[in-house]
Amino acid sequence: MRKKVFQLLVDNTSGVLSRISGLFSRRGYNIESITAGVTADPRFTRITIVASGDDEILDQIEKQVAKLVDVRDIKELAPQNSVYRELALIKVRTNQNERQGVIAIADIFRAKIIDVASDSLIVELTGNQDKIDAFINLLEGYEILELARTGIAGLGRGTENVTYL
């Protein structure tokens, strides 16, 4: 099993995300993460999907998704030719004595403290999945109360693979 990152450019219409995720569920394909947002042109939405499977399944996913009416373009975002980022919000239980330790770890990772309460902090961290995983592992001695991860958003490097519609 390996992972593949697909970037879709789709019509910005209601139900498009449901139709795409429905295709995955009907066929029994696994979605590791999915992110979606409107592009610079409000007629289109960019969707980034991380899927896992063997080569045959991943090729089948690409072909099946490309057949959907709303899909204007689909391409693989290969790691060597792309930039991936993920956002994580992490709420950590801290008391007065522990707070500085969490802040020090956050500083090392260039994370931001975006909320402080008497008994917790919320940390915002952006980076690749490995960076976020490493940060979470360093918080092992603290209690993570809540964790929200966006999944991968990505773009290909340079201008060679830009899709103009």
Image (spheres, rainbow, N blue to C red):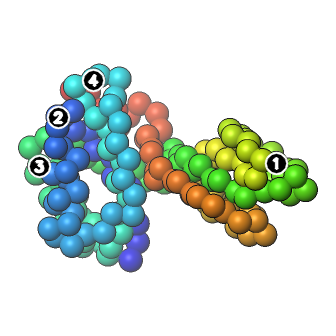
Q: CA distance from mark 3 to mark 1?
A: 46 Å
Above or below 161: residue 61: below
Residue in view at x 39 percent, y 63 percent: 32
Tag shown at residue 103: 1
Q: CA distance from mark 4 to mark 3?
A: 20 Å
> Which is nearer the N-term, disc 4 or disc 3?
4
Give percent across and percent down for residue 24.
21, 63
Residue identified by numbered label 3: 68
Q: Relative to the observer, which residue lies in front, 4 or 140?
A: 140
Which amino acid lies under the numbered mark 2 shown in the image of this protein? Thr
Tag shown at residue 13: 2
- Quadrant for the N terminus, please: bottom left
Left or right, 4 with respect to 136, comes to left
Q: CA distance from mark 2 to mark 3?
A: 13 Å
Which amino acid lies under the numbered mark 3 shown in the image of this protein? Leu
Q: Relative to the observer, which residue lies in front, 12 or 6?
A: 12
Residue in view at x 57 percent, y 50 percent: 88
Q: CA distance from mark 2 to mark 1?
A: 42 Å
